[in-house]
Every structure is written in structure tokens, then in C-alpha cells.
Amino acid sequence: MPEVSAAVDTKEDVDKEDDGEKREIGKLAVWSVSSNKPGNGVEMLRDNNLGTYWQSDGAQPHLVNIQFQKKVRLQQVAIYVDFKVDESYTPNKISIRAGNSFHDLREIKVVDLDEPAGWIYISLFPNDSKDFLRAFFMQLAVLSNHQNGRDTHIRQIKIYGPRQNAVIGHPFQFTTVEFSMRSTIR
Amino acid sequence: MEASLYECVCASLRVYMYRNATFLCERLCAEFPSENNLLLLATCYFRRNQAHRAYHVLKGAKSTQCRYLFALACFEMDSMGEAEAALLSCVESGSEVLNGAACQYMLGVICRLSDRRQAAIGFYTQALSLDPFFWSAYEDLCLLGADEDAATLYGDMAALHLQQQQQLHLEGRPQPAVAPSYVMDEFDSGYGLQALRTPYSSNGSPKHSRLPLAISDIGITSSGLSTSGFPTPSYSTPSPVQPQMSAAGPQAPGRNVQGLPPFGTGSSPGHSSGGAGDGMSRGGVGASGNPQQRRKFVDPDGKFRKIPGRLFEQPRRSTRLNTGGDGTSQQPCSTSGSGPLGQTGSASGSGVVPGLLAGSPGLVGRGGAANSLRMSISRKMTAGSTDGSDDGRRSVESLEVAGGEEGPSSSRRGSVDDDPHGVGMMFRGASRGSRAAEGAMELFSLLRILGEGFRHLCMFRCQEAMQAFSKLQQQQYETGWVLCQVGRAYFEMVDYPEAERAYSSARRVSPHHLEGTDMYSTALYHMKKDVELSYLAQETVAMDRLSPQAWCVMGNCFSLQKDHESALKFFQRALQLDSHFTYAHTLCGHEHVAMEDFEEGLTCYRNAIRMDPRHYNAWYGLGTIYFRQEKYKLAEFHFRRALHINSRSSVLHCYLGMALHTLKKNGEALELLEQAIVADPKNPLPKYQKANVLMSEERYHDALAELEQLKEVAPRESSVYFLMGKIYKRLDMLERAIYHFCIALDLKPSASDVNLIKTAIEKLPVADDLEDENL
């Protein structure tokens, strides 16, 4: 039974934040990795194919860098890893850092994984705060792997931000249909 | 062989066997390549939706009919320049323009698509002058926003005018203007409506003053008559000519072709026996016109001056003459087959096509018309004599003859006097004539009501539109089109439940009418009725996969499920099917905005505006993008434009107010919000925004008052409580603030909003200024 550390959202949290609440913003960013084995490059992280994976090829920590053109609000990161298939390549400890550039990063969260299998959702709210994290640059660092493996496999990474409000100039989404019906023109 | 092949082709066309017709026609053209036959071949292709083949066949053809069909083919192939050139040459060649109204209409469409609004309005107006029953022209006028022009064209003056013309026609007095009669197409059998259509002069412009054509009345279609289509009319011919005709513009005066050009061309193929010769078959233009009436034209020979007098002295004789004349000016309508042909035998080799004459009102004075007139005149003068036939033949040469008619004319000529049948027909014709006049008036009044409703709707005066539509009778009201318009009226008034009702009854009445389903789906989207929306999507796509509206519905369905990428795909599919479908462009824009692709969104909205500058949704969309990008001046500009188009929309007023608020023009903002509230008292957004503005002006108690009112209207709206909480915090009434924040939380807003509220609660003890610093 895979255990995840408390830093990771529980299933209920994930469900609450359904697709209506968040959207994938990975396409707004430039993705790079610290090292990779030829044929298992950074594209495998974003190809929506769980069969392909990125394999690192260097010293730890292995880094995935996500750089945005403008400051975005970040809500959640999702990683797909599978211990049963990747064994010693499966990450064990992941650190998430954010900031303005490569040299200006601050650690936001550290996540411990124990034999994970499937999607792992990591919420990006700074501890106990309810504001969204706003950053130009995000870095996902694999600090160690299971069974002390050197290199790591990650099959897919998705990064989520909050949805824009449908009604401009209004911080809220309307809860009642009467309001929302009359709030926009389509 | 040519004649029989021709007849075979026509027969095939009549029963919609297009492949057969095409094959036979190709053989015909191989043997006897004449423009007439080429026209027929092009018609076959056009009917089979192979416009490009028609284009190639007709390239270089000279006759007006050919050029008209060529223009249509160019239009289908999106080659607007060529189409326009061809149409203009059609229009200029005046004398043979039978499809006058249709030509004008097509020119109008081309101008509209190439963004020449004034020119388009001009053309549409002319089209309607030529043919007041040309609904498409009227519709386009309304869509262009030419409110006044449309109003006059279908206004009281027009009705009176039409009525007068009918009266005059009935009384056989000279009419100031004459309408072309309907074209009967060959497919019609039986009586066929030949409503008299009198073009009425639009206000004063000399260009529009119609020629004083006599109205031909009803064209009788052949089948009914053994005498192959002879026009009944017998009203006395209106006399004197009005020389204005020459003054009349290039357009053909009221051609009767009821906007069915292709068909018009096709229909008359008739048999042009042998000598049909050059020119196009006027085919189809059935106007049964009394040549006599035509007679009024200026005849270069001045021959006809005498005629009127004579004709008028002896009504009976004139009728007979009329009939005789009518015989000559036969309408091409339905070709009765061989009969006439047989009779033709004689002199007038090629059948005369009075039908063409019918069109001729326009011909005013121009070659063809004059000739035909002369012909008919001479025929009349020499009723029964064969001299006329010579004249006739001569004039005939200038006109094409539609097949069957010839027979009657010659026969008429020969036997006018002993033709009781003819006389009988004539009398029948007379009664038919008056019936036709009534019919025309009824039709016109129906079109007026529909037109009024549509016009009001296009200018977004929804209440008036609904009133207008409610004047319709039950059977007309309960039709797909009308119910969709009513639904749209409710939609524009933001009364979505009523709109849904109207649209669903439209779907019940005619489930195949997909035109309004895109708006229907938007109404369902607003009401968040996803089940009904997905059902509608399934139904429409199953009904017609190739209609852009169905894919818009599907896109809306997915958009409601927040799957914006799929929704965008579907909207783009709709655009592939019809790149001029404005609403699909706007919807694409909305999807891009939802995915935060603002640049793409801007492009899409601009495309929509390019297609239709009166599409206020697109203007609104542009405004919202600029607002999000904090370019408030631009946002204000665009909202104003949208409001200018649709000045009754409460939502638009509200948004403009919001834009002004951010530009710090609070006074104006409040005014606009007031207007928004007045425009739609059920709309909570302007009240909310008003409270916002008041709060920023520190008129906290007024703001609270507004919000209290709003609480009554929408008791479960958490944003209201949130705002109230914030106001109480400003007023330093912390307990009340907490109370309201908690209620707001209880009402289960979305997760991100929960965070907002929680933050606000946490920061309660901190003053607002400090709070702003931290952020």
C-alpha cells in the first residue's frame, strides 16, 4: 500500500479540485532537465504517454526545470511514477523549489514517497497559506531514489494553475445560476 | 434532333434526374453547341452542385442568362470578383435582364461580403424595388442594420403603393409602375401563383421609379391550359407608356424571376424550335405579360401609340387582342410539350417568348423589348394576319423563345377570332387576375408582418419584435423560422427560460430546422442545463453532420463541461463547414479566452467582426480581453461599440460601467449601472457592481443598502455576503463582518473562493491598509 507523506494532497483534496478549478499550464513553460539518457529526454515528460519516461544520466540531484514567460499562479504538481515497473529508478524524495530564475529559488516543499504507483499530486500552497504560489520558475529536484538508485525515471509531469474567472473584474465565481446566467454574454 | 434532346433534358430536370439530364445535355451540346444549350448544360451541373463545371462551361458566354448563371457559379466557387463583373454586365445589358431582382440581390451579397456596406444597401433596395417579395434581400438589409431603408420598403407606403398598382391593374388603367409577374417555372404545374408583383417605387429615387410596366398577370402555366400557357390576363392594357423607362436605371424593372435564377434558365429551355438562335432562352421567365401592357413602352417606331386607343375602345376586342397578344407573349412557363410546337410550325419559327417580355418591363425601350412590343403590337394590329408573324419573327429573333409558347402565339394569331377558348381563358384570366391581386396583397401583408418582426429583432428591439410576430396567424406562427425568431428575441432579452421554451417548440414543430439551434444551445449553456444540451448536441449532429450549427451546439456542450480544447475543436469544425459563420468565430474566441490564449482570442473576435460588424458578442469579447489585460481605455471603447449596436442589453451596460469604474469615472459608471438595472431588473450583476463602486467611493451605507436588496433577490449567492463582509470590515464592525464571511463560506463557493474568504477572515483584525501592503 503506497504511503505518501502528509505534504501530498489526499484523495479528497484532489477530488474537490476538479477540472473546473484548475487547468494545466505546462504548455506555457519551457521545460528542461539536468541530464538525460539519449532517447529518454525531456519530451517524454510531456508526451501524455505513460509508457515513455525520462531517464536522468548524471549526478544527483536530478533537476526538472520549468520556466514561464510571465509570473503564473501555481496550484498543484502531478507526477506519475511507478515503483513496480521502475524499482530502483523510482524517486524517493522530491524537493520542489520556486522563484524568479534558476539562481533565485526557494524550497517550497519536500515530498517523501514510498513505493508509489500512479499519479502523485502535490499541492503548492505555501505551508498553511491559502494564497496561490506565484512564480516565474519552478524546479523539481529528485534528491534520492528507492534502493539508492543513481538515476531516476519519471513518466509524466503535469503542472496546474487556477482557472481564470469567467467574469472579469470580479474575484468570485457566481454560485447561483441566476447570477452566472446574466453575468456574461456568450 | 436538337429539339427532342432538349425536351428530354428538360423532362429529366423536371423529375430531378440530374445525372441523366447531364449526360443527355452533354450530347446535345456536342451536336449543337449553342449558348442556349450550354446554358442548359450549366444548369444541369449547377443543380448537381457542381458549380465549377458550370463555371467552365459558361466561361465566355455572352447572353445575359448565361452570364447570370456564370456569376452564380463564380459565387459558389468563392471567386467574387468574377461574379461581380458578370453580374454588373448582366445588369447593364438591361434589355435582357430577366433576373433583375436576383442580380441586384447577388450584387448586394457580394458587396456585403466584401465590406461595402452602402453599396450593398443600395443593391438590396433596388432588388426589393424590383420585387417586393424578395425576402432574402430584405433579410440582408436588416442584418446590415439598414433600419430605415428596410422599414420603408415594407412600410405602409409600400403597401399602399402595391395596392394601388393592383387596383390600377385590375381596372386596366395605366399604371405608374408595373411589376413583373412571377416566373413560373417549368416545374410548376397548374395554376401556379403568379402573384402580381408590382415593384413599387421606392421613395422618390428616380432610379427606382419603376417602369410602368403593365403587370402581366398571372402566368398560367402550361399544363393547365391546353392552349399552352396563355396568359389570361385580360385586363386592358394600361395604356400609355411612360417614357421614364429610359430614365430608369440599368436595372431591369422588376423582373419576375423570383430569385430562382438557375431555375429560370433551366425552365424555359422549352423547345426552341430550330431557329431559336442566339440569345438566351428567357426561359422561365414566365411573366405572363400582356404584351400589350408592354406596349406602353417607348417604341421607337411609335407604332403603338395607336394601339392603346383602339384597344380601349373595344374592350372585347382588346381582350381578344390581348389574348392574341398574350398568345404571343407567352410565357415560357411550363412547356407544354409538343402541342405548341406543332402549332408553331408556321411563321414564327422560333417560339416567341413573351415570357421574356414579361421580364421586359425592364426592357424599356431597349432593343429587345421594343422589338417584342413591336411584335406584339403588330400582331395585335393585324390579328389574324400573317404579317405580324413576320414582324414577330424578326422580333423573335432578338429574343429567345421559350419553347412551348410559340405554339400558342401562332395559333393565337391564326385563330384569334374563333377562339372561344381563348376568350374563355381570358375571362378566367380576369378573375384570376383579381384573385392574383388579392393574393399578392395578402402575401405582401404577411411579409410585412414577418419583416417588421425581423427588423425589430435585428435592431435588438425585442419587445417590438415579439409583438410583431404575435400578429401572425397560428399556422404561420407555429413554424420553425418564426419560433426561432421569437426564441432569439427572448434570448436577447436575457430571458433564457422563455427562450428555451420557444426554441424547444420550434424543434418540436420542425426538428430539421437547424438554423436557430446554436442560439438555443447558448441559452442552455447559460442555464447550465447540461443534460438537455448534450441531448440537443446529439440530435443535431445526427440530423445533419454537415451543418455548422450542429457543431456549434456540440462545442457548447463540451464547453459547459469545461473541456475547452475539445470545444474549440468543434467550433473550428463548424468554421470549416462555413467560414462565414460569424457566431462560430465568436465562440472560438470565447474558448481561447477561457484557455487564456488572449492573442488567439483577439484574432477570433476580429474575424467575427469582419464577417458581421453588427455582431455585438464579438465586440463584447474584445472588450473583456482588453479588460483582463488591463487596457481599460480599449475595453471601454469596445464595450461602447457593443452597446451602440445593442442598446438594450443590461449586461453590456453593466460591463461598460465596470470599465468606467476602473478608469475612475465613477459618476458615469454609476449612471450606466443604473441604466443596466432599469433595463433588466432581474439582473443582479449591475447591482453588485454598483455596490462595488459605492464602496470604492466610501459610500458604505448606500452600498450596504444595495447589497441588502440583492440579498433578497439572490439569497444564496456567496459573493454578496463576501462583499458585505468586506464593507463591514471597512466600517469596523468586525462581528458583522465575520458573520457575513461565515455565511459566505457556508454557501459553498468554489475552492479558490473559499481560500479568498478564509484569507479575509484571517486578516480581519488587520486593517485594510496593512493588508494591501502584504499582498
Image: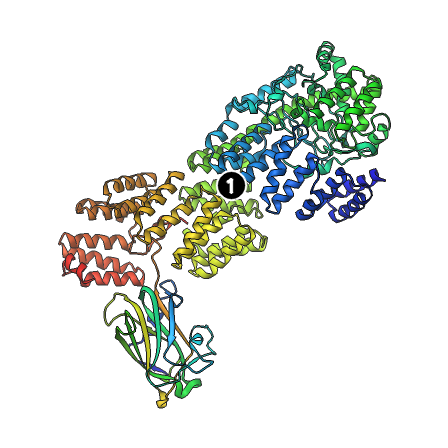
The chain identifier of the residue carrying mark 1 reads B
Q: Quadrant of residue B281?
A: top right
Q: How dense is the environment of label 1, judged by Cα within 10 Å: few (below 14), some, or many (20 and up)?
A: many
- Residue at the extreme bottom: A147
Count of labels shown? 1
In the foreground, B510 or A38? A38
**Residue B268 at x, y percent in the picture:** 74, 35
Question: Could you tell me the amino acid type at mark 1?
Answer: Leu
Position of B234 compared to B143: left or right? right
**Residue B637 at x, y percent in the picture:** 34, 43
In the foreground, B69 or B403? B69
Position of B277 compared to B502: left or right? right
Q: Is residue A118 visible?
A: no
The relative height of residue B33 versus residue B233 in the rendered view (above or below) is below
Position of B662 compared to A148: left or right? left
Of helix, strand and loop, which one carries label 1?
helix
Please name the colour scheme applied to the rendered image.
rainbow
What quarter of the picture does the N terminus of chain B occupy? top right
Q: Quadrant of residue B739?
A: bottom left
**Residue A70 at x, y percent in the picture:** 32, 63
Q: Is residue B562 visible?
A: yes
What quarter of the picture does the C terminus of chain B occupy? bottom left
In the foreground, B549 or B627? B627
**Residue B61 at x, y percent in the picture:** 71, 39
- Residue at the extreme front: B60
The relative height of residue B661 versus residue B197 in the rendered view (above or below) is below
Residue underneath mark 1:
B483
Please name the residue shown 47% across and 43% down the image.
Answer: B612
The relative height of residue B306 versus residue B114 in the rendered view (above or below) is above
